[in-house]
Image (cartoon, rainbow, N blue to C red):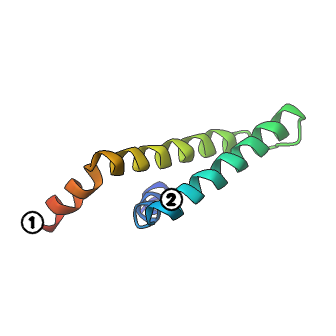
C-alpha cells in the first residue's frame, strides 16, 4: 500500500476530536515550514506541498463526516 493510502486509512480510523487535533498539528507544521521557506531554512520545499495536501485531506474527512458521507461509505462496504 502506498504511503498516501496508509496515511489516509490512519486518518479515517481517528475519532473526530483526534482528527481535529491532527488538523491543528498539521496546520502548525505547515506554518513552520512556510516560515522556514521564507527565511531560506527549508531545503526540501516539496514538504510544504505535501503538508498542504495533508491539511486538505483532513479537511475533506471532517467535512465528509459532517455530511454523513463517511458513514454511508462504511455501510456500503459492509454489504
Q: Left or right? Give the position of 21 relative to 40.
A: left
Which quadrant would the C terminus be assigned to in this image?
Answer: bottom left
Q: Position of residue 46 (x, y in %)?
A: 67, 41
Q: Position of residue 49 (x, y in %)?
A: 62, 38
Q: Left or right? Give the position of 21 relative to 10.
A: right
Element type where label 1 sits in the image: loop
Q: Are marks 1 and 2 in contact (CB under 8 Å)?
A: no
Element type where label 2 sits in the image: helix
Q: Which residue is identified by label 2?
A: 19
34 over 72 or under it: above or below: above
Q: Please report whichever mark, 1 or 2, sits nearer to the chain's N-terminal start.
A: 2
Of circles 1 and 2, the one toward us is 2
Q: Residue at x 73, y 39 (%)?
A: 45
Q: Position of residue 55 (x, y in %)?
A: 56, 45
Mark 2 neighbour density, 10 Å: few (under 14) some (14–19) many (20 or more): some
Which disc is residue 26 wearing? none
Distance of mark 1 from mark 2, alpha carbons? 26 Å
Q: Position of residue 36 (x, y in %)?
A: 84, 40
Q: Which residue is identified by label 1?
A: 79
Q: Left or right? Give the position of 38 relative to 13.
A: right
Q: Left or right? Give the position of 33 relative to 18.
A: right
Q: Residue at x 90, y 34 (%)?
A: 39
Amino acid at each position: 500500500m502506498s504511503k498516501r493510502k496508509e496515511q489516509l486509512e490512519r486518518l479515517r480510523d481517528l475519532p473526530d476530536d483526534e482528527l481535529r487535533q491532527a488538523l491543528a498539528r498539521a496546520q502548525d507544521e505547515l506554518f513552520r515550514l512556510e516560515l522556514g521557506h521564507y527565511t531560506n531554512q527549508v531545503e526540501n520545499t516539496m514538504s510544504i506541498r505535501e503538508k498542504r495536501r495533508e491539511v486538505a485531506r483532513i479537511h475533506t474527512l471532517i467535512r465528509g463526516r459532517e455530511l454523513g458521507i463517511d458513514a454511508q461509505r462504511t455501510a456500503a462496504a459492509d454489504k
